[in-house]
Amino acid sequence: MKRISRSMRRTLIALVAAMTAMVGGVVVVASSPATAATSQFRGMNWAMLGDNFKTTPLVVQGLSMSDSNATVRAKANALYDDMASTMGVNTVRLPINTHTVGTAWWEAYRGAIDAATARGFKVILAYWEDGAASGGRITNLAAWNTMWSTVTNTYGSNTNVYFEPMNEPHGYSSTEWRNVAANWLSYHTSAVPGRVLIGGTGFSQDLRDICNDSRFNSTLLSFHYYTFFYGAMTYDAFRSHIQTLLGNCASRAVATEFGAPMNDGRNYADAGSTDNFVRYIRAMAQAMRDNQMGGTYWPALGGKTGTIGYDWYSMFALTGSGTDLNLTVRNTSGADRIRYAWGDTNGGGGPTTPPPSTGTFYRINVRHSGKAMDVQSPNTDNGARVGQYTYGGNAWQQWQFQDAGSGYWRIVSRNSGKCLDVVSASTADGAELVQYTCGTGTNQQFQMVANGSYFQLRARHSGKCVDVPAASTADGVVLKQYACNTGTNQQWSRTAV
């Protein structure tokens, strides 16, 4: 069960949509070029299990055709909560096709779009063609235009919604695709160009021709890059190749698809790895960071099932039932690398606070109650619970921060010399905070993630935050870990003593 209302959870994101009839001529109204840097997009693809190339309605993983709009919205909020709290996601890329928009399912599916925009998320609505048989071309232009007319009439005025006319236009020559895309812009004027993402040529993998075509000066650009497009390369070769394909338009590019295996424990933190996927994802992350490029990782959920029943690139494992859905990161080092791509400090979910001074002891106060982190009596034992209590200047209310590397800290009690610890290295919501003899366990390592002038204490092993349950203000309430959110009962400050 989630502990607080979904609406209180963090995030920003923007939604999607857009178009009307396509005719012959190509006249695009010129406007000022799209502004530099797209790092505002911290996103995930939410896809259909089995992939989005379908001649049927698109029902992304976790949803059901029998769901109402309200149920879709509740499920979406549950998933967005976890995407936001674990990785700071603020954007979702959702698929549409001509078999979805305008149907009864569309009215329900819109709950996923509306839930995102209501919380400030950006939403990218991208068109998927009708499966492999389409050859990477739009199967039915009239139906495609009707679809986009419906979408833009609904969402054209919503500044959180972005429109991607086609996912991967690989069936068109460069000239053909640029004409199709220019006609889209010319005739679907309710789609503001600055909220339109035009895919590169091929599998949206080369932006140079689009970038050099003045008809697209005011749009954003959609960029895809996978190892299976190109094969093995060194880290440096990957970085150079990515930069080449971005052309001169990296400042307008959004990496709407990139991904690598998250199911088998690969170490994406290893800068010296010879694994091609590790070199690739590290190079992609660095290229995005260098160019202040945002992106939507492929996928959060859904995608090709292969032989394991899920897409091995998927960032999250899905559990739960009904509207009580939960996501767990499959590979922490992979998630950290994606956050690094988005510009986060030390690969974390957000900027970290300035490091504490070595050797200094601190009172650690929770924002909602003003009370101090306190080791409960008997306060020298292993397993002694840690709670909140009115500050009295006692040694068991004073803590030292010891560097655990990679932006994480051990928090050591002045009184006992023991470390703040998530009991039994549990990853469950509600696991208690205790003190225990310091070791190398990641359940004793915490990242300080800035939240204004306060910070969250995020456990390395679980990605969850130190929390005062139910936002109680009472003395003696035991601290527990819960999925990170915006509550002041998860916000802390430190004062030297």
Image: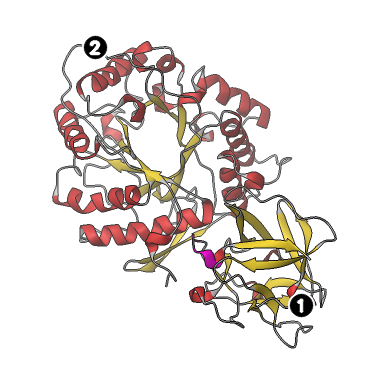
Amino acid type at circle 2 is: Val
Tell me: residue 197, above or below residue 325.
Answer: above
Which quadrant of the structure image shows residue 185? top left
Q: Is residue 496 left or right of residue 452?
A: right
Q: Position of residue 181 (x, y in %)?
A: 29, 21
Which label belongs to residue 396?
1
Which quadrant of the structure image shows residue 497? bottom right
Specify few, some or many for label 1: CA neighbours under 10 Å numbering under 14, 14-19, or 20 or more: many
Earlier sequence position, callout 2 versus callout 1: 2
Tell me: residue 409, above or below residue 372.
Answer: above
Q: Position of residue 246 (x, y in %)?
A: 51, 22
User: Is 264 part of what is drawn in magenta?
Assistant: no
Amino acid type at circle 1 is: Trp
**Nearer to us: label 2 or label 1:** 1
Which label belongs to residue 27?
2
**Residue drawn at (34%, 32%) of the image:** 167
User: Is 486 part of what is drawn in magenta?
Assistant: yes
Q: Position of residue 337 (x, y in %)?
A: 60, 44
Q: Determine if residue 92 is in view.
A: no
Q: Is residue 137 left or right of residue 250?
A: left
Q: Nearer the viewer, residue 383 or 247?
A: 383
Contact? badges 2 and 1 (CB < 8 Å): no
Q: Position of residue 318 (x, y in %)?
A: 43, 61
**Bounds of the magenta segment:** 485-489
Q: Is residue 39 left or right of residue 400?
A: left
Q: What is the secondary structure assignment of the residue under circle 2?
A: loop
Tell me: residue 46, above or below residue 205.
Answer: below
